[in-house]
Image: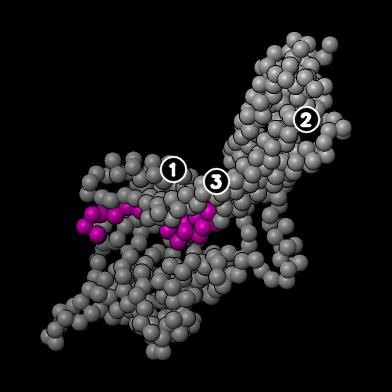
Amino acid sequence: MYKPLELFIGLRYTRSKRDNHSISFISLASMLGITLGVLVLITVLSVMNGFQKELRTRILSMISHVTIAETNGVLSDWKPAFKHLQNRESVIGAAPFIEKQVMLTSQYGSPQGVLLSGVLPEYQKQVSEVHLPKYMLAGGTEDLTERGYGIVLGVDLAARLDVGLGDKVTVISPKARVTPAGLIPRMKRFTVIGIFQMRMQEYDSATAYIHLDDATRLFSMRSGISGLRLKLDDLFKADQASADLQKQLGDKYYVKSWSVDNASLFHAFKMEKVMMFIVLGLIVVVALFNLVASLVMMVKEKSSEIAILRTLGMSPVSIAKIFIIQGSLVGILGTALGVILGVLIATNVETIAPAIESLLGHKLFDENVFFTSDIPSDMHIDEVVLVAVSSLIASVLATIYPARQAAAVHPAESLRYE
């Protein structure tokens, strides 16, 4: 005899072609609904991961993994610490910087408040990627030289100031100097030698770079700087590295990782992913309601056969297992198909999206509105497993109510009119 019996009967009910066609259709709809839900969940989560990774890459192209500064705002006698940090095992790049809020004006544009960074180009490229050709529209940070008084602007900032390469802008520092005529803000004219585009509003419209020595003179900082930027071999270890450095350097210094300044942004991303998982998971829930309905109808139709099995000695638990197996099989097939299709789509989004854009005749993401015109994807195996396991567990749970109804069938009542 085929063992186990419950599995044999459950599989036979699933494959039976003599069942009510409406029940078969509802079961098929349930399986396709589960497939669609799993497919959409895997694809959407992968695309959201891709956007998060792209945004993180762009942010870290402008800022460093770890920043070290003194609590008084000026890091003096920084060169010994700089050399020590360069030789630290996990550090692959270090750069000094001066960072101040200033006002920029030009002959034709309107005045703009800007975060001005003084950098050493040879070290800055170790901790930042703004110098890369894909971000530089014209010129480059490598052209910044001592006493050259050149400045590199974000593309939106340059547009608001109405300047291009070779044009002059005036930097006005809030730190004033005392003269016989009174307090006068420090001002210096700079020549635009580069324009970059990160496709992020806060950087393209409010960030500018000058040489570190020019910044030292402009802000009268002598040998001091604002701090040191570090790039690590693993950006996800930045929190631990900053904590270790804080403990090593003491309370005189302030050490922070990149995640501190952008904590709210990435927390919002995480919350959005959780909510998206819940919302899209409702597709699977709706499919499971169909599964429950089809199993309940199956129990009603097979009540006489259930009664016969009971009279032959099959226990209520075994009867329940038959319908649990039948419903679980629908869930397993739907989940497996959804995972396969979802993984295929998630790993080929970069190919599928251009084909859809070509068919529609326009971009899905306008590069003038979004920070990227492409649709990135970054599939995480742990999320695929989570989606699949959640779908399978939900499918099994959905069979419990119909299975209990089947187990509760009374043989005498069901066979009375047979």
Q: Quadrant of residue 8?
A: top right
| Kind of residue sitting beneath label 1 | Lys
Can you say whether 177 is above or below 288 in the image? below
Label 1 sits on a secondary structure element that is helix
Number of the label disc, if any, that sits on residue 237: 1
* Label drawn at residue 278: 3
Indicate the position of residue 121 as horizontal and vertical percent values.
44, 64
Q: CA distance from mark 1 to mark 3?
A: 30 Å
Q: Is residue 34 above or below residue 149?
A: above
Q: Is 11 above or below relative to 170?
A: above
Q: Nearer the viewer, mark 2 or mark 3?
A: 2
Residue under the point 82% across and 14% down: 2
- What is the x, y in percent for residue 265? 43, 55
Q: Which quarter of the rendering shows the N terminus?
A: top right
Mark 3: few, some, or many residues within 10 Å (few <14, many ≥20)? few
Residue occupying the point 24% across, 60% down: 74
What amino acid is labelled 2 in the image? Glu
Residue 226 on image: x %, y %: 29, 61
| Image quadrant in which you'd find residue 397 | top right
Side of 253 relative to 356 (left or right): left
Query: Quick one: label 2 or label 3, which is nearer the N terminus?
Result: 3
- The C terminus - image quarter: top right
Q: CA distance from mark 2 to mark 1?
A: 60 Å
Closer to the chain start, of discs 2 and 1, is 1
